[in-house]
Amino acid sequence: MKTIKVMLNVNNEKVTLQVKPYETLLETLRERLSLTGAKESCSLGSCGACTVLVNGTPMRSCLILTPEVEGASITTIEGLKNGEKLHPLQQAFMEKGAVQCGFCTSGMILTAKALLDRNKKPEKRDIVKTMSSNICRCTGYKKIIEAVEETSKK
């Protein structure tokens, strides 16, 4: 099978890989780089469990072919913490109890990070609208929204 050489910047580390032309970014992250925070769930881009940041924009990694993001900066949930210190969103999600089964959590946090990167003090309605793009089957989103609100106050 023919492979393609791609260079990516994943969590501030430059990586060069040989990938199949049809390999998704989700497959590359999970299977080649052992970054398992992004989850495969619907495989249709509907749920958001596989969300990662591509050049700062939340994107569904199950829908992106790795060759399409050649040269891009990719941030996964594993890339948010600083050493042993959690990112403020990760900390707020824990403190507010915004994680239950945890399956959607990485996508939720990365979606929230992109929101706060572009708007440090979003209104609640903006948080609700943004977070509604990710599905959580365990909660009513109340604690998730509270965690994002709490982080925006810091």
Image (spheres, rainbow, N blue to C red):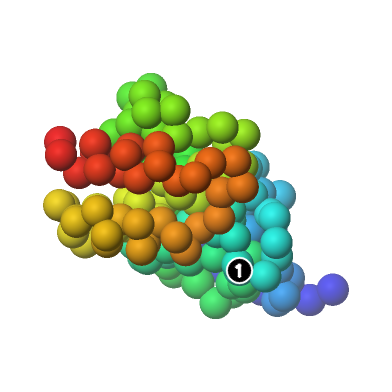
Task: Identify the residue at image location x=20%, y=44%.
Answer: 152
Q: Which residue is mark 1?
A: 45
Could you tell me if residue 5 is visible in this image?
A: no
Residue at the image point whose x is 41% and y is 51% from the top: 110
**Direction from residue 20 to residue 147 in the image, left or right:** left
| Disc 1 residue type (three-letter) | Gly
Q: Tell which of 139 and 29 is nearer to you.
A: 139
Is residue 70 shown left or right of residue 89?
right
In the rendered view of the protein, which quadrant contains the N terminus?
A: bottom right
Q: 31 or 106, which is in the foreground?
A: 106
Position of residue 130 measured from the top left corner of the image (x, y, whole percent):
36, 61
The image shows residue 138, relative to residue 4, as above or below, that is above
Assign the C terminus to one quadrant of the image.
Answer: top left
Give the residue furthest to the right: 1
Q: Which residue corresponds to the image point at 24% horizontal and 39% vertical from the top-left?
A: 151
Residue 108 relative to residue 22: left or right:
left
Q: Secondary structure at mark 1?
A: loop
